[in-house]
Image (cartoon, grey):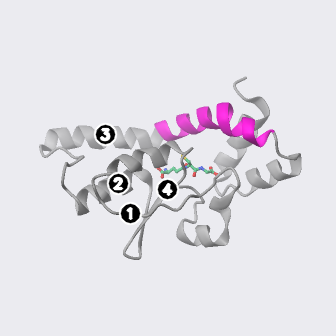
Amino acid sequence: MSFISLCCQGTYGAIRKNMEWTGHYIDILKGEQFTPEYLALNPKGVVPILIDDGTIIRESTVICEYIDHIHPVTPLQPTSAIEAARVRNWTKFVDEYVHLMCATLTFACSHRVTMKRLPPDKVDTLIAKTRDAGLRKKKREWFNLGFE
Ligand SMILES: N[C@@H](CCC(=O)N[C@@H](CS)C(=O)NCC(=O)O)C(=O)O
């Protein structure tokens, strides 16, 4: 979990269905998502994940769906087929587009500002540890250019 992660914020809503859970804070600006311990849980090196009885669930939209399945009180999912299809279209759109849009905004207006206070070699290390090559390249651009 990370309080500065929009993906995590989405899953908090689902987890707050009066369920007992324990949060473990991962500071993504310190690179805690890249420790060997965390990468063993999520090789993509991103938050959030959910561990339920030893089973690891990855991807925020999948976590929301999983929580809804195991705890259907105040369901997140509609029961009608057509409404469920609409929700599925929306979560697909979130997975395919919205996360990258949000990453661009949060990195350029927030993470970048914090990272600018770090020595350049620390910034390079943090960016270099990003697992996905495309995202690594984008982070470099976002860091160098900000909103330009
Ligand atoms: N598709 C993933 C995206 C996860 C993701 O990109 N999380 C961001 C925070 S919102 C992250 O961990 N960033 C750390 C990094 O890029 O180093 C999900 O929905 O869980």
Q: Residue at x 58, y 60 (%)?
A: 44
> To which residue does mark 3 refer?
89
Q: Are marks 1 and 2 in contact (CB under 8 Å)?
A: yes
Label 1, label 3: how many angstroms apart (C-alpha)?
29 Å
Q: Is residue 99 on the magenta stretch?
A: yes
Residue 21's disc is 1
Task: Report the magenta stretch's main SS.
Answer: helix
- The quadrant of the rendering that contains the C terminus is top right
Judged by depth in the image, the label closer to the viewer, 4 or 2, is: 2
Above or below 53: residue 121: above
Judged by depth in the image, the label closer to the viewer, 1 or 3, is: 1
Above or below 126: residue 110: above
Segment tinted magenta in the rendering? 98-116
Regarding mark 3 in the picture, which secondary structure is present there?
helix
**Left or right placement of residue 14 versus residue 83 in this view:** right
Label 4, label 2: how many angstroms apart (C-alpha)?
12 Å
Label 3, label 2: how many angstroms apart (C-alpha)?
22 Å
Q: Amino acid at mark 1?
A: Trp
Q: Under 8 Å from ligand 1: the CB of mark 3?
A: no
User: Local crowd at mark 2 within 10 Å, few (<14), some, or many (≥20)?
Assistant: some
Label 1, label 2: how many angstroms apart (C-alpha)?
8 Å
Q: Earlier in the sequence, mark 3 or mark 2?
A: 2
59, 111: nearer the viewer = 111
> To which residue does mark 4 refer?
48
Q: Earlier in the sequence, mark 1 or mark 3?
A: 1
Regarding mark 4 in the picture, which secondary structure is present there?
loop
